[in-house]
Image (cartoon, grey):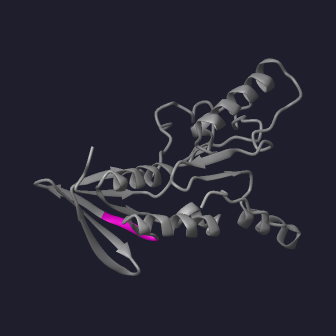
């Protein structure tokens, strides 16, 4: 599928992967991100990917907030706030890749004494909610929204709730993450920025690069 001009809201994994793919298929692509690439957690990797996207013709607006979206006669118009001013971006198609939010409002959690907020159900490191008999797993548990994270939660639940084995903690295992752009981005555990925030000068950074040039 080729779009004349694809506007993508959100430069997370989905936005980046599809943005680069559509650009390579011949579409003009504009990526609009409310924050920065990789949320400021890996500035070196963000710099490399940002340069690659620019070289392939992808327009990337970071720290830009969508104020209004409208469409008529095959034209999508997005008004975004960028650098303190309003900018209008017009395209032919729109992809919203701004993440997911939990749908828990109609589950009667208040009656069960389960605390939640807009990010999801509040749990401890063992995935127990404020009601000790209720567990929450996966995306709704206010942690990493990855399929493999949900799989880990499932195994921890079986271990903790059913078999009463030595308790496993959801925050004990580092979660790998990959973005299938070119170049690919992969990480596991804390980023350098997060590690420095926690331990400051006790951090030594090691960088791995693909040998192919």
Residue that sits furthest to the front in the current view = 213
Residue that sits furthest to the bottom in the current view = 84
* Residue 89 placement: quadrant: bottom left
Residue 35 visible, this angle? no
Residue 64 covered by magenta stretch: yes
Q: Residue at x 58, y 61 (%)?
A: 38
Residue that sits furthest to the top in the current view = 163
Magenta stretch prevailing secondary structure: strand
Classify 140 as above or below 9: above
Residue 203 visible, this angle? yes
Classify 38 as above or below 200: above
Q: Which of 126 and 77 is in front in this view?
A: 77
Magenta residues?
Answer: 63-67
- Apparent side of residue 164 relative to residue 179 in the rendered image (left or right): right
Q: Where is residue 143 drawn, in percent x and y?
A: 64, 45
Q: Residue at x 43, y 53 (%)?
A: 15
């Amino acid at each position: 599928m080729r779009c004349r001009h694809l506007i993508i809201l959100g430069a997370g994994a989905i936005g980046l992967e599809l943005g680069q793919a559509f650009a390579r298929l011949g579409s003009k692509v504009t990526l609009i991100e409310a924050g920065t690439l990789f949320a400021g957690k890996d500035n070196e990797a963000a710099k490399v990917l940002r340069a690659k996207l620019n070289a392939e013709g992808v327009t990337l607006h970071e720290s830009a907030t969508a104020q209004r979206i409208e469409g008529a006669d095959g034209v999508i118009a997005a008004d975004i706030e960028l650098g303190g001013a309003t900018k209008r971006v017009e395209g032919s198609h729109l992809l919203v890749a701004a993440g997911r939010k939990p749908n828990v409002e109609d589950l009667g959690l208040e009656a069960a004494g389960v605390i939640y907020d807009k990010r999801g159900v509040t749990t401890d490191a063992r995935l127990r909610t404020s009601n000790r008999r209720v567990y929450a797993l996966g995306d709704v548990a206010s942690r990493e929204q990855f399929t493999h994270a949900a799989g880990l939660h499932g195994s921890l639940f079986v271990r903790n709730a059913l078999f009463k084995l030595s308790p496993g903690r959801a925050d004990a295992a580092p979660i790998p993450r990959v973005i299938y752009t070119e170049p690919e981005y992969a990480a596991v555990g804390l980023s350098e920025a997060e590690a420095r925030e926690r331990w400051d000068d006790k951090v030594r950074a090691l960088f791995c690069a693909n040998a192919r040039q």
